[in-house]
Image (spheres, rainbow, N blue to C red):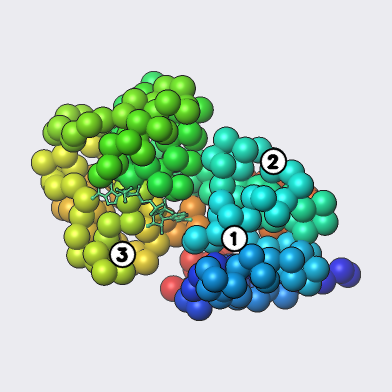
């Protein structure tokens, strides 16, 4: 059986969970892979990028190279085109994909969250907020997006149908609130981007942060008795979709769900 040589490339991927998740998926789907972590400083990226295409069958790309990889590709497919960002590269043919949005949608679906015809608020209009807003609007939600600097939220609203930018946040009812700001992890651990005045009016609170497992945002939502979802499932599913692309196989949402359940069981 062919062994695929894979990697994740980012500024600092020393703590990345991708090798562990990809190894788990490969093991349970009867595939053989190697998966390296390649931390590359921004000053070295342009000099080393060619080596990744020569040495690997495929690679994942993370902060801050999701945009800078694009000029080195021959083609971008699917969501990567609309997002203008790539997280998965197939070296043969130099094709870029983005599986973050697919991971986000499957995370909500498997948590029983149905957004069609409902109001959803996305906090943060960076790469993750854009993917979330696009997927929610594709699924028929009435989407609102709020970003600290309002220009970014306006740009997302201008690009995707069914998305409205908010200048300021008011305590009104949303079915779903998504935290895509990154506030609550690293140096902002223990801080929530919104308070319970807003959270008590929602039904579901989803945080794209996967470490810590329970961010302050989710802790507040839980205290208000709301359904909470953390970003771990999204992380797992985006890796699942990426691995299917590396092997040139079609993805199966039921298989992804089953594998994630097994992964959590083994991990905890
Ligand atoms: P990013 O590009 O840095 O975007 C974050 C955005 O949030 C920025 O536009 C920032 O605004 C805005 N922001 C920061 N603080 C805010 C606040 N208090 N209120 C409103 N907006 C605020 O980061 P990203 O790549 O999109 O990632 C965002 C989060 O998603 C991170 O926690 C990341 O780990 C997570 N993520 C998870 C997965 C997964 O698989 N689970 C995948 C991708 C990302 P400014 O423009 O003003 O700075």
**How many residues crowd around disc 2 within 10 Å: few (fewer than 14), some, or many (20 or more)?**
few
Name the residue carrying label 1: 61
As displayed, is residue 147 above or below residue 263? above
Whichever of callouts 2 and 1 sits on the residue coming sooner in the sequence is: 1
x and y percentages locating residue 20 in the rendered image: 58, 73
Whichever of callouts 2 and 3 sits on the residue coming sooner in the sequence is: 2
Using the numbered discs, state the Cα–Cα distance from disc 2 to disc 1 in whole angstroms.
Answer: 15 Å
Residue in the foreground of this view, choosing between 67 and 127: 67
Which circle marks residue 77 in the picture?
A: 2
Q: Quadrant of residue 157?
A: top left
Residue sitting at x 49%, y 53%: 234
Can residue 71 be seen from the camera position used here? Answer: yes
Secondary structure of the residue carrying numbered label 3: loop
Residue sitting at x 48%, y 33%: 134
Which circle marks residue 185 in the picture?
A: 3
Can residue 25 be seen from the camera position used here? Answer: no
**How many residues crowd around disc 1 within 10 Å: few (fewer than 14), some, or many (20 or more)?**
many
Say whether residue 98 is left or right of residue 198: right
Q: Residue furthest left?
A: 197
Whether the residues at callouts 2 and 3 have beta carbons within 8 Å, the answer is no
Using the numbered discs, state the Cα–Cα distance from disc 2 to disc 3 in whole angstroms.
Answer: 31 Å
Residue in the foreground of this view, choosing between 232 and 163: 163
x and y percentages locating residue 31 in the rendered image: 77, 67
Q: Nearer the viewer, mark 1 or mark 3?
A: 1
Using the numbered discs, state the Cα–Cα distance from disc 1 to disc 3 in whole angstroms.
Answer: 20 Å
Secondary structure of the residue carrying numbered label 2: loop
As displayed, is residue 129 above or below residue 134? below
Whether the residues at callouts 1 and 3 have beta carbons within 8 Å, the answer is no
Ligand 1 contact, mark 3 (Cβ < 8 Å): yes
Whichever of callouts 1 and 3 sits on the residue coming sooner in the sequence is: 1
């Amino acid at each position: 059986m062919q062994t695929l040589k894979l990697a994740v490339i980012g500024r600092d991927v020393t703590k990345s969970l991708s090798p562990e998740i990809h190894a788990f998926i490969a093991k349970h789907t009867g595939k053989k892979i190697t998966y390296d972590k390649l931390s590359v400083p921004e000053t070295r990226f342009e000099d080393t990028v060619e080596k990744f295409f020569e040495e690997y069958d495929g690679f994942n790309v993370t902060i801050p190279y999701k945009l800078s990889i694009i000029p080195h590709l021959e083609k971008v497919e699917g969501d990567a085109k609309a997002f203008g960002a790539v997280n998965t590269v197939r070296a043969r043919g130099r094709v870029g994909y983005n599986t973050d949005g697919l991971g986000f949608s499957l995370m909500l679906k498997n948590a029983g969250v149905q957004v069609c015809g409902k109001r959803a608020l996305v906090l943060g209009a960076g790469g993750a907020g854009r993917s979330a807003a696009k997927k929610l609007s594709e699924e028929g939600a009435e989407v609102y997006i709020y970003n600290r600097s309002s220009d970014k939220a306006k740009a997302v609203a201008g690009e995707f149908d069914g998305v409205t930018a908010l200048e300021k946040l008011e305590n009104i009812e949303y079915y779903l609130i998504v935290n895509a700001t990154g506030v609550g992890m690293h140096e902002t651990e223990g801080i929530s981007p919104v308070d319970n005045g807003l959270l008590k009016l929602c039904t579901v609170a989803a945080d794209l942060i996967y470490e810590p497992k329970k961010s302050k945002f989710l802790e507040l939502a839980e205290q208000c008795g709301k359904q909470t979802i953390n970003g771990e499932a999204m992380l797992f599913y985006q890796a699942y979709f990426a691995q299917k692309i590396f092997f040139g196989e079609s993805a199966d949402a039921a298989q992804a769900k089953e594998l994630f359940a097994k992964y959590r069981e083994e991990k905890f």
